Every structure is written in C-alpha cells, then in structure tokens.
Image: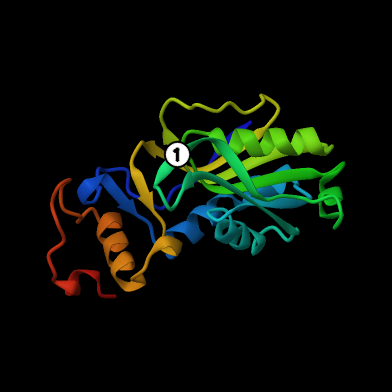
C-alpha cells in the first residue's frame, strides 16, 4: 500500500539558489496533517521515530494519532567529515535490558523519518526491527519522497505513506536552521514561488516575507 498526502507546497519550480528547498514548520505540520486520516486507518500501535529527522514529524503526528513514540538513532552521514558511510550505523537502538523493544513485539509499527532519499536508512531500520523483534506489521511514513533511483528496498508487505513526492532536490528543514527567522523567510519565498533562480541569491526586501 502506498499513500501520498495532499501537499501544501506548490507544484511549480520554486527552488532556491543551489537547488535547495527550504521548508517551514507550518508546511511540515500541514503535510503531517494530510496523512493523519490514512495513518489512523492503518491503525499503528506505536511509532518508531528515526533520529534525528524523524523526531519532530513523529511528535506532530502524535497530535492526530495518539500512540506511543519509541526512538532509535541511525547515522548514514558523518557530520564531522560530511561523508556518507557504507551503511547506517546504530547510535541508539532497543537494548535487551530496558525491555523497550518488547513493546513492538506483536504490534503494528509505524517507522517515521523526514525524507526518503536513497531509502538506505529506511531499509536498514525495517530489516533490523524485523530481525530483532516480531512486529505483526510494519509501515513507513516520511514527509517527503525524492523521485529518484533508490539504493534501498522495502519489503512488499510494508505500507508506505509519503506526504509529498518531488524531484531530487536538497531539502532544508527548520530544525537544522541556525537562524530560524532567515530560514522561515526563505521557506515563505519558496512556497510563494518567489525564490530566485538556481545560482541566484536573496535580495532583502524583508517586506516580502512579512505577514
């Protein structure tokens, strides 16, 4: 099963300079809301949020779907060297002492992340859950799916929910911003189709981004 939400973003080309697409908290919340009905119909018992990108989307989803959020942390890119690893590395996982992992045994589990890029992380997370535990069913929810050839593959039995699919562009999320006001300004320009062409830059009338 593949479900795509009704996106609040325009379909026209509104990329920022360097091909980056800036997304606001408001847009992301609406994207999550657009998937809420379909996910309620899926009837998950719990979420597994992949850190760090899946944490905030999972919390937003919990506003609509009142189920527990469990967390794992996987690293595919090295922040220090800005290079991609051969495969995801577990930074945080379900340990055998706490018994947290037992909460997904026999349950319908929804894995949550912000973006389906190469699908490598999603495949790894799903396979590790299935290897270590016995969920009755697994689904995946992402805010954004990049339309590109994927390196990873999800089992056919996995239900897939994407808020929006679009071409392979770099997404910049608000939780990665060092200057949230500037980030939100750029996100608004993107959503209005007012962003400069690729290779351009933002000129300042901040009035454009005012309420």
Point out residue 207 in the picture as x, y percentages from the top left corner.
Answer: 18, 74
Front residue of this view, candidates 193 and 151: 151
* Image label count: 1
Identity of the residue drawn at 62% across and 57% down: 58
Q: Quadrant of residue 170 in the image?
A: top left
139 vs 76, nearest the viewer = 76
SS assignment at label 1: strand
Q: Residue at x 29, y 62 (%)?
A: 188
Residue 120 drawn above or below residue 45:
above
Residue 148: horizontal and vertical position, in percent?
41, 29
Measured from the top left, where is residue 104 in percent x and y? Answer: 82, 47
The residue at the far front in this view is: 81
Vertical side of 102 occupied by 63: above or below: below
Q: Is residue 68 above or below residue 95?
A: below
The residue lying at 71 percent from left, 43 percent from top is 42
Q: Is residue 28 left or right of residue 101?
A: left
Q: Give the left or right position of residue 164, taking residue 16 as reference.
A: right
Left or right: residue 15 versus residue 115 is: left
Q: How is the image coloured?
A: rainbow
Q: Nearer the viewer, residue 176 or 90?
A: 90
The residue where tag 1 is placed is 84
Question: The C terminus is located in which quarter?
Answer: bottom left
User: Which residue appears at 56% of the width and 57% of the height?
Assistant: 57
Mark 1 nearby-residue class (10 Å; few <14, some 14–19, many ≥20): few
Q: Is residue 87 above or below residue 179?
A: above
Please identify the quadrant where the N terminus is shown. Answer: top right
Q: Position of residue 88 (x, y in %)?
A: 57, 39
Residue 130: image quadrant is top right
């Amino acid at each position: 099963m593949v479900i795509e939400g009704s996106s609040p973003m325009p379909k026209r080309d509104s990329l920022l300079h360097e091909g980056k697409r800036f997304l606001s908290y408001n847009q992301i919340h609406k994207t999550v809301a657009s998937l809420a009905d379909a996910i309620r119909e899926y009837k998950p018992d719990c979420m597994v949020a992949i850190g760090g990108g899946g944490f905030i989307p999972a919390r937003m989803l919990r506003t609509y779907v009142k189920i527990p959020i469990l967390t794992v942390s996987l690293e595919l890119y090295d922040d220090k060297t800005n290079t991609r690893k051969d495969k995801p590395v577990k930074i945080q996982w379900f340990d055998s002492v706490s018994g947290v992992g037992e909460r997904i045994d026999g349950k319908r589990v929804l894995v949550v992340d912000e973006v389906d890029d190469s699908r490598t992380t999603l495949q790894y997370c799903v396979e590790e859950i299935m290897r270590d535990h016995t969920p009755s069913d697994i689904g995946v929810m992402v805010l954004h799916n990049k339309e590109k050839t994927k390196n990873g593959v999800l089992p056919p039995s996995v239900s897939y929910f994407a808020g929006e699919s679009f071409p392979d562009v770099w997404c910049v999320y608000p939780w990665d911003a060092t200057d949230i006001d500037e980030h939100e300004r750029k996100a608004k320009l993107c959503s209005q189709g007012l962003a400069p062409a690729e290779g351009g830059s933002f000129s300042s009338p901040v009035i454009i981004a005012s309420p």
